[in-house]
Image (spheres, grey):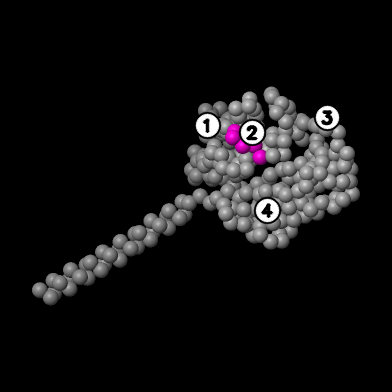
Amino acid sequence: MKKWMTIILMSSVLLAGCGDTGQGKNNGDQNEAEVPAIIEAVIDIPEKTEVGKEVELVVTVKQGKELVEDASDVKFEVWKEGQKDSSEKIEAKHTEKGKYIAHHTFSEDGVFNVQSHVTARDMHTMPTKTIQVGNVDANQHEHNDQGEEHGHHHGDVSIHLQKPEQVKATQQIPLAVHLQKDNKPLTKANVRLEIFQEESNPAWVDMTERENGEYTTEYQFPESGNYTVRIHVENDEGLHEHTEEAVTVE
């Protein structure tokens, strides 16, 4: 009898050990499948400044609720509206609490674009704000730097797609669209992505509004190759804008 009790007890211990191992493996698989939060960058610059006055350019980088202190590359690109080919890039340095700072002195009047290029944790984002320097004629507002005119004029609408630097097929990829209108976050918009390859039927993906003009979703590209992501933005006030971006999927 003692012999059988010993055998039963040892068998129970072995089964319990196997169960623990399997559970740990499943948890590991779940952790590996988790999609990291998207990197967010918020530019802080004055709305107006004077010619010859040094301006502090600040961008704060976050991932979810975490301040990003280890961005691998942060710089500002500055150009006068309509003259992006003559832009100037300035390296930014990390100070504290996820803030990266650079300084720039504007040498002439006009409306200038300030774009931050932030690379952190295998993601890249490029928000843009404008600043008025010196004497600016409000009636002399040029079109965007690509010279494209939209079908409806609703002031300047900035549409920026944010995605990881490396996009791999058959994996859930976090995507975000940042919208600004008249230099302010554009909220309460309907944002859809039209994703397609050449000579293929498009996939339509609705995005969810978060805050401060940010809209997010996840998408699994079915195979490697070159894709076009066309971003459609509409709202109840008659706004209908779109832009597109090429995405290479590994």
Dot 3 corresponds to which residue? 139
SS for callout 4: strand
- Say what amino acid the circle numbered 4 marks: Thr
Residue 37 x, y percent position in the rendering: 55, 50
- Say what amino acid the circle numbered 1 marks: Trp
Residue 54 colored in magenta in the image: no
Q: Residue 60, which numbered label?
A: 4
- Say what amino acid the circle numbered 2 marks: Glu
Query: Which residue corresponds to the image point at 58% horizontal and 56% vertical from the top-left?
Result: 66
Dot 1 corresponds to which residue? 204
SS for callout 1: strand
| Mark whose residue sits in front, 3 or 1 | 3
Query: Which residue corresponds to the image point at 76% horizontal and 41% vertical from the top-left?
Result: 130
| Mark whose residue sits in front, 1 or 4 | 4
Residue 134 x, y percent position in the rendering: 87, 42
CA–CA distance in space, label 1 to label 4: 32 Å
Question: Pointer 1 and pointer 4: residues touching (CB < 8 Å)?
Answer: no
CA–CA distance in space, label 2 to label 1: 14 Å
Left or right of 56 in this view: 108: right
For the record, the magenta segment spans: 185-189
